[in-house]
Image: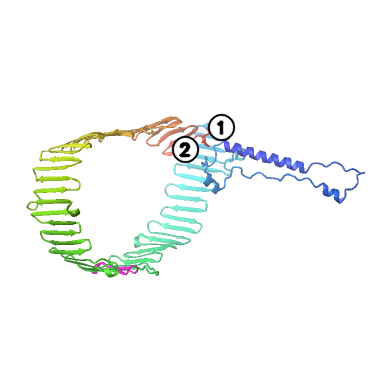
Amino acid sequence: MNVRALLAVALSTALLLRSTVAAAQRHHTAPAPDQNAKPPSDDEEEDHPTPRTEPEIPPPADPLAVAPDTRERIGSDWSAGAPSPEGSLHQVQLFPYYEERQGDYRLRMIPPLFIEQTRGLPDRSQGLYGVPQAPDTEGLYGLLYYRRRSPRLDMDLVFPAFWRVREGDNHVVVAGPFVHREAPGENDNWLAPLYFAGSRTDGGYFHAPFLLTTSHWGASGAFTLVGPYFRDRTGSNVSMGLAPLFFRGDNGNVEGNRRTYTLIPPLIYYHAEHEFDSSFTTVAGPVIVQSNPKRDVFDFAPFYFHIRGKPDSGGVSEEHTTLFPFFHYGHDPSGSLFILPGFYRRTTPTSDTVLTPFFSQAQTRNGATSLTAIGPIVPLWWSYRDRDLDVRSYALAPFFYTSDSPSGHDWLTPVVGRFESYGESRTWWIFPSLTFTSNRHGWENDLHPLLYVGRSDDSSHTVVAPVFWDFANAKGRTTVGFPLYWRFATTADNSVVEVAANTLYMQKRVAGGTDWQFHLLPFFSYGENPTGYFWNVLFGLAGYSRDGAHAQVRALWIPFNSGPQVTHIAGIEPP
């Protein structure tokens, strides 16, 4: 008996004893009256009131019952259904028949033609331990017929042609392609794949794939599709169309934020309006017209583009004109841009940039930085300087590059280069792809794209592409010898997953020891943990597992419980 049951029995006993004593005090025999006694006066009756009795508190009908809101607030240590059967175990073995009985539990089988398990059989433990008061029987008969009978769930399955399931008020019948379902306020009728129909308290659906028709509706919206026609409604928002010829949408807003659109792809026509900001967009072939409170746009794609600002209604004073590919000029409060073939000029209050095929110059931050480049088309000589940061860079392409700053020094030639950040890192590059790097955290040597070796603090890596990878750190290690060997180890729980050809080994640390498994795929599996072990042939064609007092047998991939289930409550082991 678990701890909660003991507490409940003790509480019920105390309440019964208390009510019994109170009743005895209230109904005890009074002494015989004295014949010579004088009748009491009214004053004497007031001086001797009737003694008070203790109130009666009847015991609860179910001491272990917990209200749903209380259970949700405080939680529960036990939610596994009925407790394990109580009493002695009786077994009958008349080959090939086997039966075992314990309390309200019974298992009968003639493998593999007949397997049946029942809980809730008449037994004295029903009143003592709160086991099911009505039988719950499930069984597999003749390999194809499965039957379940219980107060909550009934099932009849003749695989694969017929299914009948009752779960509470929900009834489902499946007979080949026909499906019928009934529930309070709901029903479904299917004849797959011809049609699917159903109704709900606030809507329903209808689907006929061969008629290219589908529809579903409810309180919040509806959708209908019949061939190329569709209509979709969500609240007051409606979209409809005849694909690919016509599309129309309207959000139906009557509070000043209405939005509409119309799209006619064959005419290359699109029009949309937004009531809130008084804006619209219209596309008619190559002509694009847009307007909003801040600007107007008129384009004749892909040659002419024009934007004009509206400073009087919240925009800025701007205008941009493009005649592609010959000319562009634009200005706004932040600067101006002028482009001709072979010439670019951009000016702002703090910068001035000129780009040409032979000479380019850029100055920013009011002249604090400057870049000068000279060369036919591609710059052959350039010079960069940042006076604020004291950075200078020079290059004579493709022979030499150098850069100096207070934080480091770099230089590069076609065959070797060196890049250094003082006190931080140093990298050497040697033609064609060899690099040596060192920094305050470690080092790394690479021969791209084949070899990568390095260490950074407590992490290291070794890669020989494409056949070997090894990465290690304080949390674990990953090693791959492609394609036959894979190993993943984690330090936190001492877990390992290792694959070698068609073998798989897994382990991890659990309470009380180590949980490990070995699989020779797909033929055989075996594993152990601190409370039990298991073995399987062909992933459960035949198998057995034990976890403490609970055992399970697998036959034809179907699990059967072959022993009592033990429930753990609040960390207390069962007797």
Q: Secondary structure at mark 2?
A: strand
Query: Residue 534's x, y, as percent?
Result: 42, 32
Amino acid type at mark 1 = His
Residue at 92% across / 44% down in the picture?
36
**SS class of the residue under badge 1?**
strand
Which stretch did the figure color magenta?
260-279
Residue that protrudes farthest toward the left in the picture: 376
Of residues 87 and 178, the one nearer the viewer is 87
Q: Residue 560 bears which disc, if any?
A: 2
Q: Is residue 29 left or right of residue 110?
A: right
The image shows residue 281, relative to residue 350, as above or below, that is below
Q: Could you say where residue 396 lies in the image, as x and y percent from the top left?
A: 8, 45
Mark with earlier residue (2, 1): 1
Residue 264 falls within the magenta-colored stretch: yes
Q: Is residue 23 visible?
A: yes
Per the model, the C-alpha gap separating discs 2 and 1 is: 18 Å
Hey, what amino acid is under mark 2? Answer: Phe
Indicate the quadrant containing the C terminus: top left, top right, bottom left or bottom right: top right
Q: Which residue is mark 1?
A: 90
Q: Quadrant of the N terminus?
A: top right
Magenta stretch containing residue 139, yes or no? no
Q: Is residue 480 in view?
A: no
Locate residue 176, reporting x and y percent: 42, 52
Q: Which residue appears farthest toward the right when viewing the image?
A: 36
